[in-house]
Image (cartoon, rainbow, N blue to C red):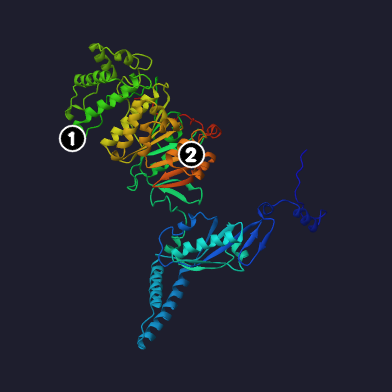
Amino acid sequence: MRSRLRAPGPRAGGPDGASALRFGAGERTTADLVAPSAIEERRDHLLIDGELSRVLSLDDYPRHVGPDWLGRIIDSGEPLDLSLHLEPLDSGAAISALSQRLVALQSSRLLDARGGRIAPAGREVAYEDAARLRDALERGDERVFSGGLYLRLRGSSPGELDAASGRIRGTLSGMMAGARPALYEMWPALLSCLPAGQDHLGHRRNLDTSSAATMIPFSSSQLAVERGLLYGENVHNSSLVILDPFSPEHENANKVVFAKSGAGKSFACKVEALRALLLGIEYYVIDPEGEYGRLAEAVGGQMVRLSGSSPYRINPFDLPPGRAGGDARGALASRVLALHGLLGLMLAEPGQPLGRAEQGVLDQALYECYRRAGITRDPATHGRPAPLLRDLLQVLRERAEPHGLAARLSRYVEGSLGRLFSEPTGAGLRGPLVVFDVAGLEEELRPLATYLIADCIGESAGADPRPRMLLVDEAWSLMRRPEGARFLSELARRARKRWLGLTTVTQEVGDFLHSPEGRTVLAQSSLQLLMRQDASTIGVVEEAFGLSAGERAFLLAARRGEGLLLARGNHVALRIEASSYEYELCTTDPADLASAPPGVEAGGAPGEEEHP
């Protein structure tokens, strides 16, 4: 038997109304939870639970302003609340009032003209403003609003409160604006600054639509542009961080993401990919964990799953699409150089590059493979079928080279690792989002696949330039190999000329920053996103990025999804915010993935590419 206690109401045969009121008074309400224990009102401030508060009212508005002119106040670092009240007014009544105002001003002008007096400049400006606003209201280009702006400052002592007020008023004075304390009106001023959205103070100013729009503090004066990607919300002032990675203001569109496991770096990259697609940017992802399947399926992208048993193949000998001019004649030499890097990953001992003699043998053998396929430096021959890795193995065996290259290469052609790279390339790539799932590959093959995919996309970008982003997740696996590190650094250098943005993501910060190539990638990246760091690596990160003590502490204690974005000389602490639909597609939380719709698994998508 269950019973539920509830406040009884007055009814026949039950408790009277007074008893019901006494019962209700003993219940806990929302007001009990949020109300302070005491408020003491003074002439120019309030004392609320030991904290001082003062409210400034904006009385003098600047004549000329730009968008987000209040950003200087928001980014000043002062502990304040900004409350903006806007109420639309009837345009007809405003037009009538402006007409009467114009009549009065015109009468004064005529009287001065008859008396031979020079008209005051202030009155002439007022007449022009009133006439301009009335015409805009008549045409429907503008509306008129009644606005009020209040700033609530906090401090622990009257001196601290006076100093903060002086700094804010000084900043406003530099913008030809003015504010004054709401003397003897601090209580209604405080109520006007609460989230209830009610203006109890009533210090108002009439504004047109354009003027009111400049007061909306929705952008950060540090990192915000008119058109770009929404990266997140500024942690300190709740403004939006918006950047265009392909803007001419950046040296390039490259980005590095450093974070420890569980900091939310994959979530941040997925949200960025979704928003990049909205701007028409093609996105390519090398996914070592099989996390991007649902995202690709939702946007109509392509899922390419690479594994030893997958029918999808990549032929490293493929030449890029045809180009015009001198670049076409150098395409074969560029491809041979790229193959040198790949073969260095395949054949060199761990941590050791191939010797000069081995590289010379490979160079001759590679050109011989292309010659036998009928491909020369002449661009007219580049459309012929490219040779395969097995052709290179055959040439090396025929030459009986003394370095054992053929024996080392045979395992990638005939052995357990031989299916992926020794056959013609499978299906072509189609946007807008292409995900290469390498989770099914052996650990030894992942750097090779990453190298090939990145090289293929880089060549395609050079042949057909348009905005593209390439995300290399867990880039440290490629940076550990000398050939892979050199390739990634060269790709970072060339990306800008190919309208390509390279995003490298890693949790092994030490491996990345301790190599010259890793520092080159960092130097060639205009954007750097640092998320939560481990105490063992924070020293390296602090030195590499020149962080302050406060920024170091922030990265050590950052919550999941928070980070420090470095761009255009600014360090901005941001929080990655996603809509409910974005969160559903981007989350990697096992509890969320377990509740995913039937037919959509965490590691793949129903429409993934399985046939060449």
Q: In this view of the protein, can residue 489 be seen by the observer?
A: yes
Considering every residue shown, the one lying at the far bottom of the view is: 115
Residue 2 image point, x, y percent: 76, 40
From the viewer's perspective, is 572 left or right of 351? right
Residue count near mark 1 (Cα–Cα under 10 Å), binned few <14, some 14–19, many ≥20: few
Which residue corresponds to the image point at 41% horizontal and 65% vertical from the top-left?
A: 142
Circle 2 or circle 1, nearest the eye: 2
Q: In this view of the protein, can residue 577 be seen by the observer?
A: no
- Whether 131 is drawn above or below 549: the answer is below
In the rendered structure, find residue 441 and report the number of the disc placed on it. none
Residue count near mark 2 (Cα–Cα under 10 Å), binned few <14, some 14–19, many ≥20: many
Residue 146 image point, x, y percent: 50, 67
Residue named by callout 1: 326
Residue named by callout 2: 531
Do the numbered discs 2 and 1 sit on residues whose CB atoms are within 8 Å? no
Q: Between residues 315 and 82, which one lies in front from this camera angle?
A: 82
For the residue marked with disc 1, what is the amino acid? Answer: Gly
For the residues labelled 2 and 1, the Cα–Cα distance comes to: 44 Å
From the viewer's perspective, is 45 left or right of 586? right
State the count of labels: 2
Residue 286 image point, x, y percent: 39, 31
Which residue corresponds to the image point at 34% horizontal and 44% vertical from the top-left?
A: 246
Q: Quadrant of the C terminus?
A: top left
- Whether 370 is drawn above or below 474: the answer is above
For the residue marked with disc 2, what is the amino acid? Answer: Met
Residue 413 image point, x, y percent: 32, 16
Q: Which of marks 2 and 1 is nearer the N terminus?
A: 1
Image quadrant of residue 221? bottom left
Q: Between residues 370 and 356, which one lies in front from this camera angle?
A: 356
Label 1's element?
helix
Q: In which quarter of the image is the N terminus?
A: top right
